[in-house]
Image (spheres, rainbow, N blue to C red):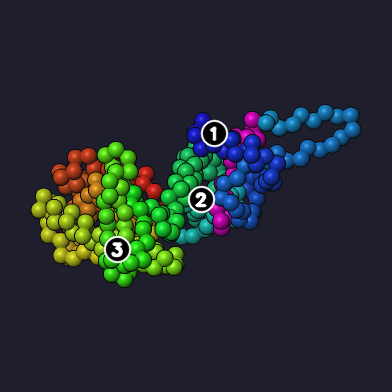
């Protein structure tokens, strides 16, 4: 049984009796929050002198609810009740997309609901697995939420950096300087980012000053790594731009322009290097065909493992 279902079983001991069950089948449904809940068994009919067996307790514990915030349909699987966003459009096949919000189902205008539900049941295991992964990813992201206060920590190049307000502003008003002062644990330096701000600094001032410093560091690090790998791939890059894209780590143009997401600077250098090499390789092949991956592998034989690490990384929530 997947670990996320086991986690939901434990939650049921805490929440049992607090949520109503959604109706079964493919009926219309309004969006529900939160996205993942445990399900309460439906009330049993009362008939004098007749014993009606209750739904097995293990069945109640094992069922998990996933609800897309814009859900307009739902379906009951063996171990989960899924409320999903259903769309129709100009397409030839039924498509499934699982993202941070949940499941989205797209279907041709002429496809019946019965066919849609049959397709959903055929892909049940894949859908539940992906929803579970998305839920776990969301939990990891929530656990990395940054608290903007004196003494808080942020990840920088894969290691924590602690924020410290410097009211004397020794490095200038609104400036920021990274200091290493001993070891927090053996072999790991205790690094402090001193922010030239007054003790009365607001959350926004802390965040903006830290972000400005991170973006400066991102440009410095990315430039150095581009210069390191470009000769190995036999390409020349012309311009570096920093992006804040929510779903893309980078992009490349045939004119030699490279765009990299500045938030990569939160991650360790091996992961940054993978994205840099990936984008530089596009200057050789503007696609993801076999020759493109051959170029990537020529300078980074372990690119597949780094790519996997990037997918598993949780971006700190600001």
Q: Is residue 114 visible?
A: no
List x then y, in percent, for residue 292.
20, 49
**Image point 32% across, 40% down: which residue?**
185
Q: Residue furthest right?
A: 48
**Alpha carbon separation for disc pair 2 and 1:** 19 Å
Which quarter of the image is occupied by the C terminus? bottom left
**Dot 1: what SS?**
helix
Distance in Å between CA atoms under marks 1 and 3: 45 Å
Question: Position of 15 compared to 185: left or right?
Answer: right
Residue that badge 3 annotates: 176
Given this view, does label 2 or label 3 mark the residue nearer the observer? 3
Q: Residues within 10 Å of mark 3 (few under 14, many from 20)?
A: many
Q: Which element carries disc 3, helix, strand or loop?
A: strand
Mark toward the start of the polypeptide (2 vs 1): 1
First in sequence, mark 2 or 3: give its number: 2
Front one among 213 and 35: 213
> Between residues 58 and 266, which one lies in front from this camera angle?
266
Q: Where residue 130 appears, x then y in whole percent?
A: 46, 43
Residue 252 locus on image (x, y percent): 23, 60
Q: Which mark is residue 6?
A: 1
Q: Residue at x 19, y 40 (%)?
A: 301
The residue range painted magenta reads: 58-71
Residue pictured at 52% horizontal, 58% vertical: 88
């Amino acid at each position: 049984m997947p670990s996320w279902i086991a986690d939901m079983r434990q939650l049921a001991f805490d929440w049992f009796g607090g949520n109503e069950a959604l109706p079964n089948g493919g009926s219309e449904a309004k969006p529900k929050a939160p996205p993942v809940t445990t399900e309460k068994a439906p009330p049993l009919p009362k008939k004098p002198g007749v014993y009606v067996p209750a739904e097995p307790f293990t069945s109640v514990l094992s069922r998990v609810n996933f609800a897309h915030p814009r859900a307009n349909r739902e379906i009951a699987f063996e171990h989960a009740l899924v409320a999903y966003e259903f769309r129709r459009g100009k397409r030839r096949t039924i498509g499934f997309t699982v993202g941070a919000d949940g499941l989205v189902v797209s279907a041709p205008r002429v496809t019946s609901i019965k066919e849609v539900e049959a397709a959903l049941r055929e892909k049940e295991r894949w859908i539940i697995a992906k929803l579970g992964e998305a839920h776990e990813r969301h939990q990891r992201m929530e656990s990395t939420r940054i608290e903007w206060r004196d003494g808080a920590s942020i990840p920088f190049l894969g290691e924590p950096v602690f924020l410290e307000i410097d009211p004397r502003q020794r490095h200038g008003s609104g400036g920021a300087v990274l200091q290493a002062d001993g070891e927090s644990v053996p072999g790991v330096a205790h690094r402090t980012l001193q922010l030239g701000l007054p003790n009365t600094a607001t959350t926004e001032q802390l965040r903006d000053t830290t972000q400005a410093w991170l973006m400066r560091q991102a440009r410095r690090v990315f430039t150095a790594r581009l210069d390191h790998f470009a000769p190995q791939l036999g390409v020349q890059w012309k311009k570096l731009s920093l992006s804040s894209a929510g779903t893309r780590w980078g992009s490349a143009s045939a004119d030699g322009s490279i765009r990299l997401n500045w938030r990569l600077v939160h991650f360790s250098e091996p992961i940054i290097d993978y994205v840099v090499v990936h984008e530089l390789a596009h200057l050789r092949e503007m696609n993801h065909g076999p020759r493109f991956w051959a170029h990537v592998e020529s300078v980074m034989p372990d690119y597949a493992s780094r790519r996997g690490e990037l997918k598993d990384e949780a971006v700190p929530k600001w």
